[in-house]
Image (spheres, rainbow, N blue to C red):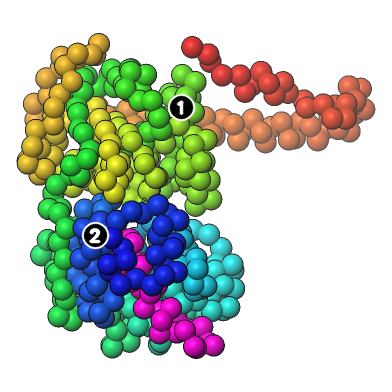
Amino acid sequence: MKFKDLKLTEPILRALSDKNYKKATPIQEKAIPVVLDGSDILGSAQTGTGKTAAFAIPIIQRISQADRDSKKIKLRALIMTPTRELAIQIDENIREYSKYLGLKHLVIFGGVKQGKQVKKLQSGVHILTATPGRLLDLHNQGFVDLNDLKIFVLDEADRMLDMGFIHDIKRLIKLLPRKRQSLFFSATLPKNIIKLSQEILENPVKIEVAQTSSTADTVAQEVYYTNANSKREMLLHIIEQRIDDQVLVFSRTKHGADKIVRFLKSNNFNAAAIHGNKSQNQRQAALKDFKKSQIQIMVATDIASRGIDIDKLQYVINYNIPNIAEDYVHRIGRTGRAGESGLAISICESEENVFIRNVEKLIGRRIPAVEDHPYPQTQQPMTERQKKEFNKEKERKKRERIAQHRARKKEKEERRSSNKSESKSSSRRKDKSGPTPKGKKPWNFKKSRRRKSK
Ligand code: AMP
């Protein structure tokens, strides 16, 4: 369906045409008329289906029409989303879709100083996109006025609950005006989500676009079975043989993501990690560089990946198979977005075979295995007893590493304090060596930065 058949106004149609959106995606086709009509929505939508535009476009239209003649800028729509990256992306989309309308919009999230956000809030905002913690915090401080709110959107509700935001959501609901329109979106709709939706929505129109357990048809999926100790080589092989563009690599842990990045860099690949241990600025900088194609390989953990939306991302690699099968669907939803084609490749070690089976059960199809590669899986999955032993040994090694780290730290501190007392006494003597010549670094910078070449 064309956008102009959805009764959208000219400035919005022009902005959509600038974005090169040719026709509405199924969720947009279904949701836009309902939102324009003022009804509540209970939406279940697969990632990458164009869900953001499905709620953002009609919200922009409604607010721009209702507030056309009003001089005072009032907060009319609040969009709550679980991660900062997702919040930023939603706000970016709002900026693009509303660029010919002059609506005020803002995104707020934690992990950064609040000053700039507060200043913008004070100058007036029509549409606010926020993560729960920062929103409640600024509301408590009196910087967010929710009294004139007309539309409330809860995005990625299932993820919100997974991330432990249930109490924040419940607190927030109490602060919203009773008379409002609410739009509730979730990738999955288990019982606890339905229960939460009932506390928020009134006679909602249910919109289901695709089975939440299904993966986009445009994404081809493959799996390489290998051994745990050849995963890194497997990854290199895949990147060299199969990937001719940017790729998003998923790691289960933050530490693992950093290790993969170090390995890729040592093999002269341009890679960066994005995960919860990085500061918000580091995450944003890495994401920006990736979007501008200045980074070829982005290594991400599941939570950080939630908001990643890169136009026409073709490739996703699962370096670990997620033990929660739904995460697989979310991960590969980063590619093949809005009808583009994509390829999702998984690297599976023997201990993860069971996770692949779970994913296959969830998506209702087999993931074809690539047999022809140099690192085939030869190991068997461990028995329960072996697993116990393995974990015990892992714990022991971890404790040993921590103890070594502490000992090294202590030794360093002792050395530093003895150096200090030594330098105090030596400074009393005359220093014959003289200062470092001006402009010259006391170490060989180039040498210390030199990378291993292939
Ligand atoms: P979302 O599911 O909201 O994360 O959107 C996924 C991607 O699809 C984003 O990059 C959007 O810019 C893009 N998109 C949304 N709607 C359309 C459309 N109608 N035509 C083409 N691309 C779209």
Q: Which of marks 2 and 1 is in front?
A: 2
Q: Quadrant of residue 86?
A: bottom left
Is the residue marked by circle 1 packed among few (<14), some (14-19), or many (20+) residues within 10 Å? some
Q: Which mark is residue 262?
A: 1
Query: Residue 269 lies in magenta, yes or no?
Result: no
Q: Quadrant for residue 404, please give it.
A: top left
Looking at numbered disc 1 in the image, what kind of residue is underneath it? Arg
Residue extent of the magenta highlight: 50-76
| Residue plotted at (53% across, 75% down) | 121
Q: Which residue is drawn at 54% across and 69% down?
A: 117
Identified by mark 2, the residue type is Met
User: Can residue 52 be seen in the rendering of this structure?
Assistant: yes
**Residue 351's spot in the image, x, y percent?**
16, 28
Name the residue at 30% across, 72% down: 7
Question: In the image, 130: left or right of 54?
Answer: right
Residue pointed to by mark 2: 1
Query: Residue 43: x, y in percent?
Result: 19, 65
Seen in the picture, residue 360 relative to 118 is either above or below; the reply is above
